[in-house]
Amino acid sequence: MLSRYFSTHLIAKGAYSVQVQGLPRKYKCTIPTCPVDGFQYPKDLVRHNDSVHSNEVPGTRRFYCRVEKCKHSEKNMKGLARLDNLNRHMRKAHPEISERVS
């Protein structure tokens, strides 16, 4: 029954990554005040912690812009959750700095 639901529902919606209601979300966020129900896969929980709770969860990492006046600099404590986002930010916001961050 579930496979029939997947095929008809996904074809009708035209999407292949629809979160199906009713599947267990056993990977729960450890932050008590977080309103998220949970995640179906552990990688989704890791991505959530890295992007939403980077200051609260030990072991998460932020990537900071090297331009001191930028809102994503370490001085402003904003940062970005992923390296690819920092590289895109550097390319778009600071095209005069051509180095790629690794």
Image (spheres, grey):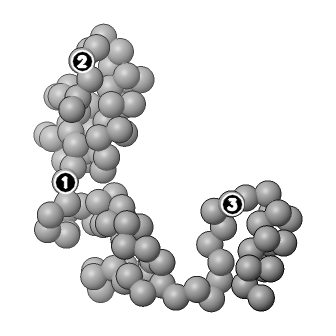
In the rendered image, the residue lying farthest to the top is 96
Residue named by callout 1: 61
* Corner quadrant of residue 73: top left
Q: How far apart are marks 2 and 1 (CA)?
A: 21 Å
Label 2's element?
loop
Contact check, label 2 and label 1, Cβ < 8 Å: no
Residue 93 horizontal side relative to residue 55, left or right: right
Q: Earlier in the sequence, mark 2 or mark 1?
A: 1
Residue at x 80% of width, y 80% of height: 4
Task: Please tell me how crowded label 1 is: few (under 14), some (14-19), or many (20+) other residues with Cα within 10 Å.
Answer: some
Q: Which of marks 3 and 2 is nearer the N terminus?
A: 3
User: Which residue is drawn at the image coordinates 38% and 82% (left, top)?
Assistant: 27
Residue depicted at 72% across the width and 84% down the height: 2
Residue 42: image quadrant is bottom left
Q: Name the residue under label 2.
A: 99
Looking at the rendered structure, the kind of residue marked 2 is Glu
Residue at figure coordinates x 20%, y 60% from the top left: 60
Question: Is 61 above or below relative to 64?
Answer: below
Task: Look at discs 3 and 2 and give the one toward the viewer.
Answer: 3
